[in-house]
Image (cartoon, rainbow, N blue to C red):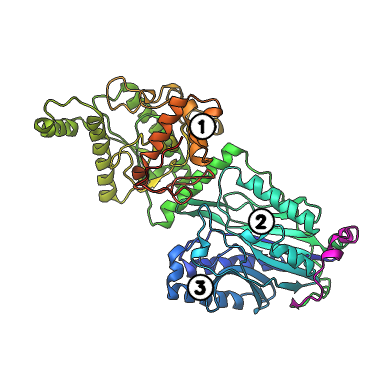
């Protein structure tokens, strides 16, 4: 059987750490060669990390990545390497190098540059125009980059017409819930349509708001996934490709004969190999995570990499005894270990004994350090200080926000004194509607659940308890009605529609861009929808000042959804 053994190296690159990324790439090359792989492929911009954004405008950055590419070339003895980098040919190109046995055989420049959602590649790159194919041990291989494979008649189609039996796509495709399913559906469709093997390698790791899930796959010429990599972990996925099976399938499929593009130039040799004897690689096809587990792992990885890649060791969380701070604490422990998480309760005159007990119980369950810093004395001092100015004006949200800002000050003081990163605990429902306090509960370095609706917060909390087989998060936290406890007998539902009603409206308006009338037609009350839309529109200024947080939905606040602060457009 004439086979080609490929290895897909889904690595966790760090943006800007060109030497460190290069060292990791060389280690994976060594491991792939040791397992007798013919080719090892790395993700899009593996050398620079993705997305490098305006680092691309620094000539020294680009030069450093080219120097590292040459060092990788020199480390490629006895193996072929496909690796993502930034090419400079009179302009910048998002590029993939095809290296074989220390020789750079060619470069593919990304043709389709995404400029939607979180992507901004038109800002930096010129699109490619070439569709090269490469020969390797009897196979013809087409190499393309991320967005290229999403277009049915794009580079992969032309490369297959030129004789490619294997299409290697290197990607840095950010995660959101449901993305893996859509991606695999597309890849299996391409492989069946092309009667070719599609080998897809994806980046893994967190980069600011983005999380890359890995989930590399190999789909055979019949559109079947024959190998799947790990999710949210670095991995080296091996797969033996049967070239004879591809030939047999093509003999029964006349489409390529009608579409073939004529004379083809193949870089490198496409002659059959000498039949090196090697035992077959064991097939590894992991079952994907179920949806809640997938979202949870994205939050853990995004938190871990943000903290670690930015040089922090420990984090601090304000523990209110509520579900949001409880979930953030559990995620932090799973990401960093209990020894690196500090929980701080900051009770006031409005804090119930139940909340204080549940916060302490959570900390004990997680094994984290727990501190209690009451704010009553500071709150009283504020009220006394402002009393002459506030004379004859009734108490309102001002006094509530003073409490939140005192707590924010305390957490930031701990951060300054001990070097702990503050994790904020606001969820997407609160951030969307402005049910949060600037310089108060919004103060901090990273917003773990910023893109998680409140109803999903509860689902994730129950999922994590079920995974533990015990109540890590006290059951009472999941049963009590949500409250900020900033005034007597306060409930979230005093200020917002109940979350089971609010979250679907927010999803329709924020993530799907549905109009007021369209949302009403979905069965929601006009006045409620109008009220929610007004809250979202009038709080853009708050969201602009929020800490970055993990993106887990298709449309997150920030890079995904860009609206002006000064804006008089009214939905109707």
Quadrant for residue 308, please give it. Answer: bottom left
User: SS for tag 2?
Assistant: helix
Compute the Cα span from label 2 to label 1. Answer: 33 Å
Compute the Cα span from label 3 to label 1. Answer: 51 Å
Pick whichever of labels 3 and 1 is earlier in the sequence: 3
Question: Closer to the camera, 281 or 190?
Answer: 190
- Tell me if residue 178 comes above or below residue 365 in the rendering: below
User: SS for tag 1?
Assistant: helix
Q: Position of residue 412 (x, y in %)?
A: 27, 45
User: SS for tag 3?
Assistant: helix
Q: Position of residue 481 (x, y in %)?
A: 41, 22
**Residue, disc 2:** 150
Residue at 43% across, 57% down: 309
Q: Going by the image, does 107 lie left or right of 451?
A: right
Quadrant for residue 99, please give it. Answer: bottom right
Label 1 crowding class (10 Å Cα cut-off): few <14, some 14-19, many 20+? some
Q: Which residues are magenta?
A: 248-267
Q: Going by the image, does 65 lie left or right of 109?
A: left
Q: Position of residue 413 (x, y in %)?
A: 25, 46
**Residue, disc 1:** 517
Quadrant for residue 250, please give it. Answer: bottom right
- Residue 96's mark? none
Magenta-drawn stretch contains 145: no
- Residue 65's mark? 3
Label 3 crowding class (10 Å Cα cut-off): few <14, some 14-19, many 20+? many
Magenta-drawn stretch contains 259: yes
């Amino acid at each position: 059987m004439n086979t080609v053994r490929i290895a897909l190296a889904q690595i966790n690159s760090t943006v800007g750490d060109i030497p460190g990324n290069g060292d990791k790439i060389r280690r994976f090359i060594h491991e792939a060669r040791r397992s007798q792989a013919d080719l090892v492929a790395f993700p899009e911009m593996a050398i620079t990390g993705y997305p490098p954004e305006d680092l691309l405008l620094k000539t020294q950055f680009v030069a450093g990545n080219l120097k590292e590419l040459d060092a990788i070339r020199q480390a490629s003895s006895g193996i072929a390497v496909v690796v993502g980098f930034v090419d400079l040919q009179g302009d910048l190109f998002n590029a993939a190098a095809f290296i074989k046995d220390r020789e750079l055989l060619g470069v593919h420049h990304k043709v389709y540059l995404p400029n939607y959602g979180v992507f901004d590649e038109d800002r930096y790159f010129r699109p490619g125009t070439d569709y090269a194919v490469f020969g390797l041990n009897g196979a013809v291989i087409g190499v393309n980059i991320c967005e290229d494979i999403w277009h049915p008649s794009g580079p992969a189609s032309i490369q297959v017409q030129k004789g490619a039996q294997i299409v290697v796509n290197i990607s840095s495709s950010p995660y959101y819930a449901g993305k893996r399913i859509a991606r695999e559906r597309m890849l299996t469709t391409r492989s069946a349509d092309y009667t070719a093997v599609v080998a897809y390698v994806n980046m893994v790791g967190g980069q600011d708001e983005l999380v890359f899930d890995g989930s590399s796959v190999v789909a055979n010429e019949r559109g079947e996934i024959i190998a799947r990599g790990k999710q949210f972990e670095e991995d080296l996925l091996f797969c033996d490709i049967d070239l004879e099976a591809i030939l047999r399938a093509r003999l029964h499929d006349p489409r390529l004969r009608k579409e073939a593009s004529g004379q083809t130039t193949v870089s490198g040799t496409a002659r059959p190999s000498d039949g090196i004897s090697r035992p077959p690689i064991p097939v590894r096809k992991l079952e994907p995570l179920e949806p809640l587990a997938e979202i949870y792992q994205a939050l853990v990885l995004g938190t871990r990499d943000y903290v670690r890649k930015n040089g922090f060791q420990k984090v601090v969380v304000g523990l209110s005894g509520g579900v949001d701070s409880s979930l953030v604490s559990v995620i932090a422990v799973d990401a960093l270990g209990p020894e690196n998480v500090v929980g701080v309760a900051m009770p006031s005159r409005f804090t119930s004994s139940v909340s204080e007990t549940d916060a302490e119980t959570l900390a004990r369950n997680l094994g984290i350090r727990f501190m209690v810093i009451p704010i009553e004395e500071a709150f009283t001092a504020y009220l006394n200080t402002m009393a002459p100015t506030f004379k004859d004006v009734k108490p309102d949200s001002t006094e509530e926000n003073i409490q939140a800002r005192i707590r924010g000050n305390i957490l930031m003081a701990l951060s300054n004194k001990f070097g702990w990163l503050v994790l904020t605990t606001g969820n997407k429902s609160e951030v969307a509607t402005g049910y949060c306090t600037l310089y108060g509960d919004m103060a901090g370095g990273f917003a773990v659940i910023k893109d998680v609706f409140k109803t999903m917060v509860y689902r994730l909390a129950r999922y994590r308890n079920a995974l533990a087989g015990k109540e890590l998060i006290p059951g009472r936290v999941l049963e009590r009605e949500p409250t900020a406890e900033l005034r007597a007998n306060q409930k979230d539902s005093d200020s917002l529609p109940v979350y089971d009603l609010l979250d679907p409206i927010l999803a329709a308006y924020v993530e799907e861009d549905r109009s007021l009338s369209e949302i009403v037609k979905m069965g929601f009350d006009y006045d409620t929808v109008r009220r929610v839309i007004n809250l979202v529109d009038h709080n853009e200024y708050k969201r602009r000042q929020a800490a970055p947080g993990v993106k887990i939905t298709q449309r997150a606040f920030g890079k995904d959804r860009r609206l002006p602060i000064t804006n008089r457009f009214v939905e109707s």
